[in-house]
Amino acid sequence: MLGNGHVQFGERAEETDQLKGWNRASVRLHARAGRPHVATWAQAGVVTAADLLAGDEDPRPGAGSLIERCVDALRAAGVTVRPKVRGDVGYFARDIAQAAVDNGCDFSLGVTRNPAVWRAAAAIPDKAWRKAKRMKGAQVAVCDYAPAGWPPGTACVVRRVKVRAGDVSSDPRARRRRTIPKDQLALALDGLVEHVYAYSFIATNLDVSTPAKAVAVEAWHRCAPTSKIASGMPSTAPHCGTCPPGPGRPTPCGCGVPYWPSTCLPGCRNWAGWTTAPAAAGHTWAPCVTGC
């Protein structure tokens, strides 16, 4: 999983009367900002490669190097399965998709809502839509769109979510408005329809040759960053704070429910092995019980 954020360091400036009430980020004059750019082994919740960029630096040009170092780290850890590179729409770039393929990975990247992809979505037959997994009111289909120059086999998966017209904000800055086709948005704002659809798009080289496979890929892309359940996590996967649900049993970390030891590799004899321990307030990654 690719991701980036912001971190600020340096001296904090004093707020003036003129600046009070502004966004806090805007009042820290003369501060220097950095952007941590990381690749994460999503299953283990472990950062495998990272760069510190300038606060205004585009992370996309360096993503290829990040992918290469991440794959090297996975191989060194004994991972033999083909990795999948997941990135949001900020990583919609041909070079990133190609870097994934060149390093022996599949990819799943968010797509910017451009005119070509909107046209392709509008052409999807009604009978092609299938119910999405774990998302109420959502449907999934594959549209006839592939970004120019991307690796062979790239396909575009579309998710649409039904939105009540009354829930569409009249504020032109509202993010959801950008996910709704302009003609539907106009009808909703004029009160001429009861609902509209909000759309999201994914460019991927994963197998989406059947509706069921497309639904599975969309669910993986949407859920992988937070639930860490992609690529074969067992049904007894961790459930501690941000971890995915699982049947409750006491564990080494003391949180009282199943918890996957972060130091164990998939396939380890203790990967799904749990022991009993008193409940504790802390929710932290636990080392493997036997130190393997």
Image (cartoon, helix red, strand yellow):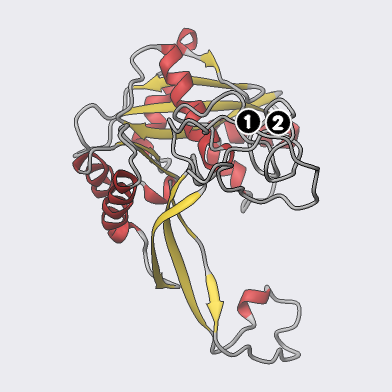
Most foreground residue, 180 or 130: 130
Specify whether 159 is left or right of 115: right
Q: Gap in Å between the C-alphas at discs 1 and 2?
A: 9 Å
Please name the amino acid that badge 2 sits on: Ala
| Kind of residue indicated by mark 1 | Leu
Going 33% across and 21% down the picture, which residue do you hit?
A: 207
The answer to whether one can see residue 181 in this image is: no
Horizontal and vertical percent for residue 256? Answer: 76, 37
Q: Residue furthest top?
A: 127
Answer with the quarter of the image where residue 7 lies.
bottom right
Q: Position of residue 38 (x, y in %)?
A: 42, 58
Of residues 276 and 163, the one drawn nearer to the viewer in this rendering = 276
Q: Residues within 10 Å of mark 2 (few under 14, many from 20)?
A: many
| Residue placed under numbered mark 2 in the picture | 165
What element does badge 1 sit on? helix
Residue 98 seen by the camera: yes
Q: Position of residue 110 (x, y in %)?
A: 42, 40
Q: Is residue 137 left or right of residue 90?
A: right
Residues at marks 1 and 2 touching, judged by CB atoms closer than 8 Å:
yes
Instruction: Identify the mark nearer the N-term, 1 or 2.
Output: 2
Q: Residue furthest front?
A: 290
Q: Which numbered disc covers residue 57? A: none
